[in-house]
Image (cartoon, coloured by chain):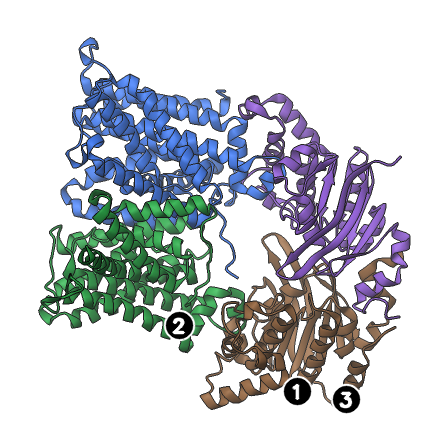
């Protein structure tokens, strides 16, 4: 029984760290730019493909490549799509993001075909903690996600660029009068968000199948997480990821496995019932 | 015996410790024009939003036509007979002028019949044309609000409030963005509304307009009412002059 | 309600509906046209929420699937006839729509979209996994046709086409007439400026709820016919892609117009057929069209054609066009970040 | 009439020197929001080390004019030059680099950041070394003791007066040559208003020019050398500040006494 619980918690941490990482990337971009970047699901998918395609170079070099490639993609989509739409209504941004998702998935389909790819784990084997058997790869995923979010915290808190990003998210007029360029900061923000999404995909690749629509439900959950966490709250998003992971893991263990994906959504609707105005909050918060 | 239409009692509203409106009590008589003035940050707009239903008060109460209105939803205040305009005239941007007036009048027919009322009834159109004429925009029904001058937009905003058949009209900064000559025309226009037997509460900081228009003026400063009197007395009030020119009250 | 202004487009539309099967005579083409009409009903329904009320919902894919499943379950497992399931499907759709509306009443902008996404997803998951009721991935079949074709001298696909032509005409006319009542007028007022609408006495929440409920009912109706048209249904009929597709179709076709949903449906039905030989490029093309429309023609194809027709008309009348006139890009205002 | 005695005394210390060199020249500037003209052919100048007041009722177009000077609003007619070069179309970033700093109405601090971070953001375009930044912050903290006391507190949790001090401090971090203050006394208690104007005088002593838009006419005229009066987007009057402060026309512009 205790072993079951430990196993469930271990599973929850693993899934939660992926959800959390993707939610963090969305929260950052939403908090600063108010862009609901639905296509980050596809960015994650492309990150996973980078690892799958470059598998002959080992694991870590492809992961780094995924991060860099997705950062470049982030700059491109911000410059070509979201910056021109910066005064557009929310629905338009959603549609643009969804269009981008389709284009990226379509490109993956054309380039890599519809078949699943799988990636060998970076470290083979596993161990048993408190009766829960955990592969090293899964531990690696959790550690990498937490380190990435810690790194983002440090970056936003202590570097000049990080400060500028927070500033643009908090007051556009304020950032204009101190001489920041919200457009340039927007490019940087989208690049970082996209790189994080790419990392989430790259981490997911060895423990899941890689195919064009692999991140579809993932990104919907990530959206639900950032609404729950208060859109724009970065550490809230990571925490929300773990909560959704727990919710799924225990729900499928003790309620019913079929409705695994439904538990976080049900939690979301429950919260809407209690607080119908939603959990508001827009500015990027590191705390 | 004078009839009170609108009254507030110890009305207060604070934002995080700052009392934007502080214990304000006043009563508006039927058929008068009641002006509210005060320097920037005096709490005029907050007071207006309390009466119009945008904000709930922190303390105190508001009554209109014998009903407690301070927690009433906006549309119900309208049904009760309170029309309002907004600071920076609010428009329906994709409605033509004619449609704007028709939309504004669409909610006064209630019940299922009101919901299913066809949009092209002759009687509604006739009413719209009458109001169009009254606000001086006859013949412009097919223009969009963005094609109007500031003064015309302001008149349209007032027209949209009037077509709901209010007995009390709240005007928020009607002279905002108008040049001097237009302010005079607006003054004449607002005076013509009085003839329809409508009580008016107006907030504005163009003192010239307010002195001319109002029967009584209430002066606010730092959230408090510092004077309430006829315009002539207000103009010579030392506290008022001090409040306007930034001298601490009572320093003379 | 037929006025001089709308008589010409109405006749053109009806003629098109009647004559199209004579232009595209093969049963294959007629089936595609029938699918187009069913999509057009869904899109017209969604447009009541999105285009007229400014409620950008992605839950309509799930509501469409819900309608399909109500009909599927009641006909296949309970043994009802198609027509008796239709009102039930509409009622269930409308009630679920009312529920969604109540839950999301006070949400604006992104929050509304995400909330409908979540609720839609929940419906999809329930349909996929409540296998006792829906048979899950196995699906349901055969869902009966609305009409027994023996009694009608036309060939079956043509009969189905004309039935859908009548139903879509009724739905479009109903939606059009609704928008020509005070309800439509109030919805437009709310969409344009909800604060002003409330100030002139319009009950913003109630009007939005009514619109959402009707819109949900129409989506379920379309789903009900889709089940019958396909005869076999499985959970992907309720997937979130359907909701997004519907939203995309309206944005591409053009919001708050009669022709918009049909143009959107045409793109979503015809494009895959054109690209049949290169299916992997289909979604790239769709995505690109979507991005280009959003960037360069925010009023959609109907908006574009309106401007183009306006320009042509003005070539003859000599009047200058006013670029602001056709802009209905007021779905939701974006607030200044500061 | 009540004048602020401290201000009067301090003001006397600021003398304008012989040749007046104009650093800011605004010529026939016009601006519109959509179809609404907000600033109509406004012209004004500010000299080196000079304090100029821009007074008028709200909605007169003062804020819009000031925003266009730092490139936040785009004008459709007229020109702006600073330090002898044409800057009509410059970006806010270029304005900050050149030393033209706006301290906006409503302050626009970064509410969820510490006071210290708000100050650091003020110097973001200067590329100072760490030591220089520390020195700069120390300077600001001496000028505004409250900034020092609250340096780790989130700016959004400060009172209005404290926020105004932080906003002024943030603007000064950019080493302005021309500091533009939009309604710095808005919403402040009278004692704090006086404090704000004392600080303006201190800033003037460093040789920085100040352009100040105010509804608080008397205080603004108390510190300024010259003033412009704005009404409905137009500049309707200009002249020596001490002369304007006793002008009956100004009183009427604000209260409308003449027509009763």
Chain D painted colour:
brown
In front: label 1 or label 2: 2
**To which chain does the residue with label 3 belong?**
D
- Kindly state the secondary structure of the residue where label 2 is placed: helix
Task: Give the residue pinned by disc 3.
Answer: D13
Which shade of the palette goes to chain B?
Answer: purple
Q: Which residue is mark 2?
A: A156
Q: Quadrant of residue D10?
A: bottom right
Foreground mark, 2 or 3, reads 2
Q: Is residue D70 above or below residue C232?
A: below
Q: Is residue A22 left or right of residue C200?
A: left
Q: Which chain is green?
A: A
Give the residue number, with chain letter if any, for mark 1.
D207
Crowding at dot 1, Cα within 10 Å, few <14 / some 14-19 / many 20+, comes out as: some
Give how far across and how far down residue A153 sits, in percent.
37, 71
**Element on which disc 1 rests:** loop
Nearest to the observer: residue B184 or residue C23: B184
């Amino acid at each position: 029984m205790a072993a079951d619980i430990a196993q469930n918690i271990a599973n929850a941490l693993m899934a939660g760290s992926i959800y959390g990482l993707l939610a963090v990337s969305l929260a950052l971009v939403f908090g600063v730019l108010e862009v609901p970047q639905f296509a980050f699901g596809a960015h994650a998918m492309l990150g996973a493909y980078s690892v799958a395609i470059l598998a002959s170079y080992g694991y870590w070099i492809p992961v780094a490549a995924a991060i860099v490639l997705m950062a470049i993609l982030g700059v491109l989509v911000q410059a070509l799509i979201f910056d021109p739409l910066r005064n557009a209504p929310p629905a338009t941004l959603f549609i643009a993001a969804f269009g981008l998702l389709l284009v990226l998935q379509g490109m993956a389909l054309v380039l890599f075909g519809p078949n699943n790819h799988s990636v060998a784990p970076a470290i083979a084997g596993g161990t048993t903690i408190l009766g829960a058997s955990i592969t090293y790869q899964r531990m690696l995923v959790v550690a990498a996600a937490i380190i990435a979010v810690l790194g983002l915290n440090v970056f936003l808190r202590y570097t000049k660029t990080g400060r500028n990003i927070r500033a643009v998210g908090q007051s556009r007029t304020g950032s204009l009068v101190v001489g920041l360029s919200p457009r340039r900061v927007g490019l940087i923000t989208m690049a970082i968000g996209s790189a994080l999404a790419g990392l989430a995909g790259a981490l997911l690749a060895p423990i899941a199948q890689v195919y064009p629509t692999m991140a579809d439900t993932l990104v919907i959950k990530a959206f639900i997480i950032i609404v729950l966490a208060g859109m724009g709250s970065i550490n809230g998003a990571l925490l929300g990821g773990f909560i959704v992971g727990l919710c799924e893991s225990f729900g499928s263990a003790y309620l019913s496995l079929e409705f695994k994906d439904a538990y976080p959504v049900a939690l979301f609707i429950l919260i809407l019932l209690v607080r119908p105005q939603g959990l508001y909050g827009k500015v990027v918060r590191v705390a | 015996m004078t009839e009170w239409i609108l009254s507030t009692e110890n009305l207060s509203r604070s934002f995080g410790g700052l009392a934007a409106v502080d214990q304000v009590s006043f009563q508006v008589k039927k058929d008068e024009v009641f002006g509210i003035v005060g320097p920037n940050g005096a709490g005029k707009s907050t007071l207006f939003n309390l009466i119009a239903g945008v904000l709930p008060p922190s303390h105190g109460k508001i009554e209109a036509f014998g009903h407690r209105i301070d927690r009433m939803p906006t549309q119900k205040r309208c049904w009760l007979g309170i029309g309002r305009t907004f600071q920076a005239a609010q428009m329906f941007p994709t409605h033509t002028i004619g449609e704007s007036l028709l939309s504004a009048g669409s909610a006064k027919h209630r019940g299922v019949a009101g919901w299913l009322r066809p949009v092209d009834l002759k009687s509604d159109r006739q009413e719209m044309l009458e109001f169009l004429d009254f606000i001086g925009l006859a013949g412009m029904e097919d223009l969009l609000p963005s094609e109007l001058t500031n003064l015309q937009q302001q008149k349209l905003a007032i027209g949209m409030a009037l077509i709901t058949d209010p007995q009390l009209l709240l005007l928020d900064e009607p002279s905002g963005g108008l040049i001097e000559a237009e302010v005079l025309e607006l003054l004449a226009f607002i005076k013509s509304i009085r003839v329809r037997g409508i009580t008016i509460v107006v907030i504005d900081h163009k003192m010239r307009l307010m002195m001319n228009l109002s029967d009584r003026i209430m002066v606010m400063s730092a959230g408090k009412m510092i004077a309430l009197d006829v315009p002539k007395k207000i103009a010579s009030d030392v506290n008022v002059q001090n409040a306007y020119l930034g001298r601490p009250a009572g320093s003379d | 309600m037929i006025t001089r202004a709308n008589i010409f487009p109405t006749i053109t539309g009806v003629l098109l509906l009647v004559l199209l099967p004579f232009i595209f005579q093969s049963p294959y083409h007629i089936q595609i046209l029938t699918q187009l009409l069913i999509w057009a009903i869904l899109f017209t329904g969604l447009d009541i929420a999105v285009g007229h009320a400014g409620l950008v919902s992605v839950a309509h894919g799930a509501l469409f699937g819900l309608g399909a499943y109500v009909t599927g379950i009641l006909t296949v497992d309970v043994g009802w006839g198609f027509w008796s399931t239709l009102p039930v499907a509409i009622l269930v759709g409308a009630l679920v729509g009312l529920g969604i509306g109540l839950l999301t009443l006070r949400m604006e902008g992104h929050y509304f979209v995400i909330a409908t996404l979540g609720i839609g997803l929940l419906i999809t998951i329930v349909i996929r996994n409540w296998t006792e009721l829906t048979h899950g991935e196995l699906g349901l079949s055969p869902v009966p046709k609305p009409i027994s074709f023996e009694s009608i001298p036309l060939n079956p696909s043509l009969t189905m086409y004309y039935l859908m032509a009548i139903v879509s005409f009724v739905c479009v006319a109903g939606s059009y007439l609704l928008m020509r009542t005070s309800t439509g007028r109030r919805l437009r007022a709310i969409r344009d400026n909800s604060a002003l609408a409330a100030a002139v006495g319009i009950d913003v929440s109630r009007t939005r709820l009514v619109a959402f409920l009707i819109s949900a009912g129409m989506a379920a109706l379309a789903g009900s016919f889709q089940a019958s048209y396909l005869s076999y249904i499985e959970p992907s009929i309720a997937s979130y892609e359907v909701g997004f597709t519907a939203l995309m179709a309206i944005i591409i076709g053009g919001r708050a117009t009669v022709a918009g949903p049909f143009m959107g449906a045409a793109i979503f039905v015809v494009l895959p057929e054109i690209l049949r030989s290169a299916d992997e490029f289909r979604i790239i093309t769709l995505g690109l069209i979507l991005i280009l429309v959003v960037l360069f023609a925010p009023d959609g194809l109907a908006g574009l054609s309106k401007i183009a027709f306006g320009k042509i008309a003005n070539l003859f009348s000599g009047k200058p066009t006013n670029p602001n006139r056709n802009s209905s890009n007021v779905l939701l205002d974006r607030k200044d970040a500061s | 009439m009540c004048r602020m005695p401290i201000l009067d005394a301090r003001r006397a210390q600021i003398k304008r020197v012989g040749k007046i060199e104009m650093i800011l020249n605004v010529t026939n500037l016009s601006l519109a929001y959509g179809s609404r003209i907000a600033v109509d052919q406004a012209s004004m100048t500010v000299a080196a080390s000079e304090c100029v007041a821009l007074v008028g009722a709200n909605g007169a177009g003062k804020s819009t004019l000031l925003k266009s000077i730092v490139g936040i609003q785009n004008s459709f007619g007229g020109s702006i030059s600073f330090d002898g070069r044409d800057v009509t179309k410059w970006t806010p970033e270029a304005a900050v680099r050149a030393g033209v700093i706006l301290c906006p109405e409503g302050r626009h601090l970064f509410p969820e950041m510490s006071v210290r971070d708000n100050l650091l953001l003020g110097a973001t375009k200067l590329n100072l070394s760490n030591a220089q930044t520390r020195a700069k912050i120390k300077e600001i903290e001496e000028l505004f003791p409250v900034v020092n006391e609250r340096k780790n507190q989130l700016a959004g949790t400060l009172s209005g007066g404290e926020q105004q001090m932080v906003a002024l401090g943030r603007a000064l971090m950019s080493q302005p040559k021309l500091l533009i203050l939009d309604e710095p006394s808005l919403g402040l208690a009278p004692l704090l208003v006086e404090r704000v104007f004392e600080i303006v005088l201190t800033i003037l002593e460093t040789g920085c020019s100040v352009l100040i838009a105010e509804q608080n006419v008397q205080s603004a005229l108390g510190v300024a050398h010259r003033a412009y009066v704005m009404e409905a987007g137009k500049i309707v009057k200009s002249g020596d500040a001490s002369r304007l402060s006793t002008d009956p026309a100004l009183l009427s512009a604000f209260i409308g006494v003449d027509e009763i």
